[in-house]
Image (cartoon, rainbow, N blue to C red):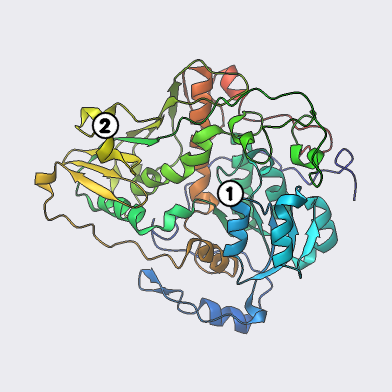
Amino acid sequence: MHSAQEQPSPRAPAGRTSPPERERSEGRGRPSRTPAAVRIPRRTFAGLTAGFFAGAGYAAARAEGPADRLSVAVIGIGGQGGANLRAMKSQNIVALCDVDEGRAGKAFEEHPQARRFTDFRRMFDAIEKQIDAVVVSTPDHTHFHPAWWAMERGKHVYLEKPLAHEVDEVRRLTDAARAKGLATQLGAQRHALPGLRAGVEIVKSGMLGTITEVHSWVGSVRGMPPLPGPAEPVPGGLDWDLWLGPVADRPYTKGLAPYQWRFWWEFGTGETGNWGCHILDIPYWALDLGHAIHVSGSGPQPDPHRTPTALASRLDFPARTAVDGASLPAVSVHWHQGLPPALAAHGIDKKLADKKNTLFVGTKGVLLCGFDDWKLLPEADFTDATPPRTLPQSPGFHREWIDACRGGPRATCDFAYSGPMAESVLLANIAYRVQGEFDWDARQMTSGRADVDAMLRRTYRRGWQI
């Protein structure tokens, strides 16, 4: 295994492919199956996939035996990585990888049979053939590299939001998943919640008429962290060089690892990247959205290094065809860090908006919803309204991906669906940072603005080029 500086890069794609028409998956049309095959015996595969769908919905899969389980490697096992690891406990955990031995210690103890690694590249060198699928839950700036290495080697990937740090990285992963026929899932686990699905079902039912605009928000003021202090010795058990990964070398300082990195542009994507893929999942699913064609942003004066405590962005989407064949008009989705002014315009106060994050404005009414609850307005027009139950029940968000890895139905947040959404989240950040607007040509991946296009990709330090 070469050092980080000498490590040869895996194969780069032949070129950028144009964004495909979104593949339809469960809840957005008839489920299709993941074309990739994993090393599961034919008799086992047949038993596991039989009856995954009964009519339009999932049926319970039979109990798994040792030979049925996927061999899974988990990269990043602290924080959300620990939660994802627990969700994989029914599978065969063959490897655990983390750059921070202290945060990984408990997981190591709970999985003594798993091989332990600090560097994901050494893991693939050592046991690539023993791995069927990989879960990646690292900081945003190190999402792309382990996911790319896994996919280049034909491994199925579960990847935390916002999928990657750069728009170009998101597109490359989305293209690779499609080209290689891999089972993928973005970590937008709230997609499986009944409350979120109820909101989607209301919109899809036509109860609100034609949707004319959407407002989504995260009620958070996190951002603009304190400036880092002087350089300090690296804490024991932390491989700082590997934590930095593709980012330019810098001395260790407090205030980045293990969490505050999220609010520094070099490493994170702020609250928009943190929550955007969870919250914008609601309008994306309900309205069959794809790539935005125009993006604008505004807010407090941008800091060149730190993410903001408030912002506003607008994503404009073209007319399109829904999964059921209906024609849908152009629509604008407004994203806010902080409560949007549109709430007051519709007579919605802070108390009513509590635990909500999305407002659909239709020609026949308004829907205020979130992950767990919803409310139709004006109330007098919807006294007996009940959301139609039209979406198949999820067997569990992580279970969707496990089943897809075996050749079952595509997971509901596979990269074909979540890739364009993640790109939009990152473009919303860029629009805020340039304090302006731009047309977005998703096929050519260009805005026509040099300052915007410069933010679509980054230069990796030596040894991390892909």
The amino acid sitting under disc 1 is Glu
Rendered location of residue 204, percent (x, y): 28, 51
The earlier-in-sequence mark between 1 and 2 is 1
Q: In the image shown, does 453 or 82 lie closer to the viewer? A: 82
Say which residue label 2 marks: 343
Q: Which mark is residue 227?
A: none
Q: Is residue 153 visible?
A: no
Distance between the alpha carbons at the discs numbered 1 and 2: 30 Å
Nearest to viewer (mark 1 / mark 2)? 2
Rendered location of residue 36, percent (x, y): 62, 64
Q: What residue is drawn where x is 49% and y is 23%?
A: 432
Question: How many discs mark residues in the rendered view?
Answer: 2
Mark 1 touches mark 2? (CB < 8 Å): no
Q: Secondary structure at mark 1?
A: loop
Say which residue label 1 marks: 160
Label 1: few (<14), some (14–19) or many (≥20) C-alpha neighbours in 10 Å: many
Q: What residue is drawn where x is 71% and y is 49%?
A: 146
Q: What quarter of the picture does the C terminus occupy?
A: top right
Label 2: few (<14), some (14–19) or many (≥20) C-alpha neighbours in 10 Å: some
Q: Residue furthest bottom?
A: 43
Rendering quarter of residue 278: top left
Q: Secondary structure at mark 2?
A: helix
Rendered location of residue 403, percent (x, y): 54, 68
Q: In the image shown, does 255 or 114 lie closer to the viewer? A: 255
The amino acid sitting under disc 2 is Leu
Q: In the image shown, does 198 or 350 lie closer to the viewer? A: 350
Rendered location of residue 140, percent (x, y): 63, 40
